Image: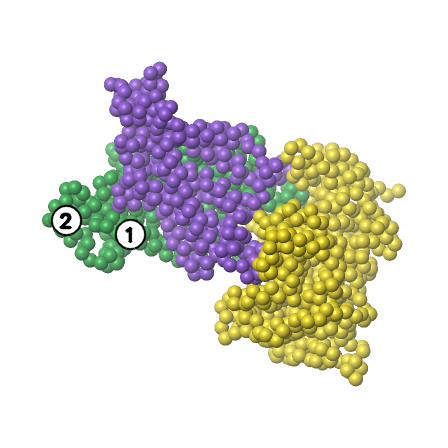
Chain colours: A yellow, B green, C purple
Amino acid sequence: MIKPVLKVEDLHIVVKGLNGTEKLIVKGINFEVQPGQVVALIGESGSGKTSIALAALGYCRPGLEFAGGKIEFKGVDLISTSRLERRALRGHKIAYLAQSAAATFNPSIRIGDQVTESAVLHNVLSQKEADNKAVLLYHDLELPKAETIGQRYPHQVSGGQLQRLMAAMALCSGPELMLLDEPTTALDVTTQIEVLKSFKSLIREKGTSAIYVTHDLAVVAQIADHIIVLCDGEIMESGPTDQIIHHPAHAYTRKLMAAVNPIPTDKREIKISDKQGRLTLEVEALYAGYGQIQNGRPEIPVLQDITFSLPSGSTTAIIGESGCGKSTLGLSIAGILPRASGNVRLDGKNLPARLEVRSRENLKHIQFVFQMADTALNPRQRVSDIIGRPLRFYKKMNRIDVRNRVLEILEMVDLSPELVTRYPKELSGGQKQRVNLARALAADPEILICDEVTSALDTIVGANIISLLSRLRSKLGVSFIFISHDISTVATFANQIIVLYAGIIVEQGPADLVLSPPYHPYTKLLLASVPELRTDWLDDTVQLQETKAAIARQVEINETGCPFYTRCPFAISGTCNESLPPVRDLGAQHSVTCHLDGLALPGNNDPYQQRVG
Amino acid sequence: MLLKRVGVGLLTLFVVSILVFIGTEILPGDVAEVMLGQTATPESLAALRTQLNLDQPAWLRYFGWLADLANGDLGSSMTGSTTIETLIKDRFANTMLLAGVVSIVAIPISLMIGITAAMYAGSAIDRTVTTGSLCAVSVPEFFTATILVMVFSIQLKLLPSIARPTPYMSFFEILRTLTLPVLTLSFAIAAQMIRMTRAAVLNVLDAAYIEMGILKGVPRKQIILKHALLNAISPIVNVIALNLAYLVSGVVIVETVFAYPGLAKLMVEGVQTRDMPLVQACAIIFGSIYVVLMMLADLASFLSNPRLRHPK
Amino acid sequence: MNDSENPIITFNEGSGIDKKRFRFSWTGWLGIIIVTFWVIMAFAGPYIAPFHEAEWISDNTFDPIGTTYLLGTDYLGRDVLSRVLWGARITMGLAFAATVIAYLVGVTLGIAAAVSADWVDTLLSRLNDAFLSLPTILLGLIVIAALGSSLTILVFTAGLIYASSVFRIARALAKDVFVQDFVEVARARGETIWWIIFREVLPNIIMPISSDFGIRLVFVILFIAGLSFLGLGVQPPMSDWGSMVRENLQGIAYSSPAPLAPAFATASLTIAINFIVDDFTSKSGGALIKEIV
């Protein structure tokens, strides 16, 4: 029988309070990692997954302590062994990859020195050998300028590159066990593919065992052999990847899976609310950005020539990667960031750019829900004050009415009335986001702008917020502008989708038309980048022409030509980099901003003439 | 960036000169009256006013004064007919000597203690250092000075209680005479530097890359001396410069206690006799030193930050 | 003591002081006891003191510690203990008044700068920087050279000089809060600037600002004591601790307690305040230390 690389037996970890109180956060975990096997620990925040992974280095974060059990690495118990023994294993036989490479690289030391540090330190390689090996690893990880990237400082490379450089750091001493702690969570979906791909091929190639910690089932499906589902420090379910994904036994696992939205391929109807008499919003030729405004153009332009309209009671999703100007668009509609030029019309009447000039009525009509409930709620105000203020401010309600209405609104967002006296810090992440939402609803708005309201939340909590929003929409008839970087979140939820790239609308139209061919090349890229719950998705998607050229590049705002030119696999040299792409009307209010005509657009085996005709 | 900081420094110097001018020539109302006090006669007042150009508008006087300053002309004192330059020359050298010795003594010691305390944070050594230094920064210099004189001069009769270096003294005699003022100043400054150094290192020691170092199996010495200190250089250099600048205020008290013939004592004497041109000159010298040191602190932390040294 | 160590308590930290978990250390308790003692003396000192502060009770100057005159007599033959007790009121009263002025001016201007247009903020901050770029004692000397020394001038000079460091802290804190999303939400709701200042910003900066008060108070005590020691602060026949040290400086030669007692009094008060403040502001830094092998 083959001996496991790592054997965890009845592991207990406690968190120590200041008054000597102890609370178990890892409650009797058992599992093994076989040679060459990738075991995934999956769970939401607070499940103890990171603590378990760090325990495999014999390490506990300050405040935590081992409270029983064994962690044997090739027969050595990491908990009871000497500190020197543990140190000798760390970075040598067992290597750790953290979530945020930006924070884990020392900003004052050149990258190369950090990558080779542990290999040299543990006398695995000489400095020269280590340098050579590092360059090979950079090549393997498909890093640009592999020969010289080690000379740089961490701040001089991009986030995706740094994440891969950290993999090089972990691999340089040739470890037998790698611990990967959410290594792609902080990245954009398109960057994630590239990083995942490098990790996967390296782990396979070197035959290293690994523990992969994540909250994302779809990501894990690509890379793990074995999945352990954790909740509250206990194992819910454990088994081979295929089994867990296709035949989940535990209810919690099924809940996790339900929260991963597959992009619907069939056409479906999202009903526009039947409540009548609501207002419509039109945005016309909007330019916005930062810095001084001259001739209707800001010094640092972000948005250019944005035009769309929002039918009453509908939901419009704005999607794009970070840096595309999604939030800027939401902020300038709300007037929080005044637009440089263009019109924003509410029910036919143009709204002033600056919110100071807007009437109280108009302010009430458009409510903006910020992404981070942590900073959007005043820590010094109780829930009752937070939700009650718009009632008092816009509706001049008296105390008793306010109190009753606040309770009604809490009920509407599925919060218990006893939370009314709490301060934000006494609420969970999901509860805070509901209060954040409730405050906006209290104003009784016509248009609710939600900026990435689920992206800071755990998968299941986020999914619950989405279903709450769907219910509220049909109940209240509010129009939604839903800003998200995640096309899969909005796919089930929006009637209309606007795809932003580098500040311009590259595609817009009814959701089912945008999500089905023909696509703008960028839409196609976004769709192809969403991890799917099948084990061969990653291998498939890296073969796609659309993703090959485009992944792992950052959004840049171009002066001339199509901003997507550098990443576009269909780019026509001499055209796309020279002139701005035209807006092509594909009928049924669906349009694409691209030099390619409808026939040449990706995914178009079903010519659009058919649809038009 | 670098140029901008120097620009801001020069601008600050300019504003400082305005502040000093306002403080010494406009705030008092009629400077002539203030300076002559009860001895004033209409004739002497008028004479002094002409001498001080008080008949001119303030802004004209300001620029005249600034132009003189730029040419190294500090004006002349009211008490004697000597120029301020001759008054200040030796005094300035004395103050620099004192400050220099204090820096040489205090900086290395406090850096060592501060870093050690941070390395053993939470230990008995650390608690002793933090509590001790907290006490030391809280006490007035005259307290330290009195105690030191009481012990070393009166009781033990080891060191002089008055510090007057003369050109005829040997090196060791000068050292001996400087010991108590240097100790007093070092005490306050070292305590402050220890606390700030400790805080700067601790701040770095909690960073994620330090945890990564632990997880890579990097030994203690290397984590502290390489991973932590490289990142603490910038705040530590800042600490040093700030405290050198602080010497400027420290010397005012210490020179008075030990009757040390330095610039600060001269300025206090100027204030007591209300010799405005003298106060003005001393203030502008101290102000400039202070501003320049602050600027150097910024430049030093700029240079030790790779983010700024190697832009993208 | 150095003004540059402004322990600017960050927004999150200040608002997060958990009452259940906060406990004073033994130095903190010692500080509380000493400060309480001196506060009582500031009120009751003249009634408890065996003699009047200005009473010439002995023919001998610089009497040593004895039974009649517990802390001996000073250079004019006055009772040192009584003078220290009387002096508590003026030393602490002046410093307290000056610190209050510093806070009124500093916090008001600091918040104003934080919420005003950029150019106003820049102007105020630059001016303040220039002000701060002169050592405090130097500024004090200039003002006293210009205006002479009286209690009023002393209090306002100290208050205005220290207002600039309060300004810097208040502005930084308010600025931190002002860019938070919840302020943006209030703005977007259409709230007035007064609502935003008093309801959104102030409640979030009041804690860190008030724990800074102690430190500022120590600076002011040392500043006034320093000026008095130079003979430029509190003028005779009134006395505070700083000027008492100065008056009795030649007593050192006779190992008299006269210069030591007020020096000790000042030191005990400032150390005690710092002990208390330290408990509030000390950070639990260095948690990783014990893991470093």
Task: Give me the residue at 58% from left, 48% from top.
Answer: A380
Q: Which mark is residue A384?
A: none
Task: Give me the residue at 62% from left, 78% from top.
Answer: A580
According to the image, label 2 marks what residue? B45
Task: Give me the residue at 55% from left, 32% from top.
Answer: C24
Do the residues marked 1 and 2 share a common chain?
Answer: yes
Question: Toward which corner of the image does residue C56 lie, by quadrant?
Answer: top left
In the image, residue B58 sits, relative to residue A307, either above or below, namely: above
Q: Secondary structure at mark 1?
A: helix
Horizontal and vertical percent for residue B259?
A: 28, 33
Which chain does the numbered disc 1 sit on? B
Contact, CB < 8 Å: mark 1 with mark 2? no
Q: CA distance from mark 1 to mark 2?
A: 21 Å
Q: Give the residue furthest to the top.
A: C67
In the image, residue C283 sits, relative to residue C123, either above or below, namely: above
Mark 2, residues whose alpha carbon is within 10 Å: few (<14), some, or many (≥20)? many
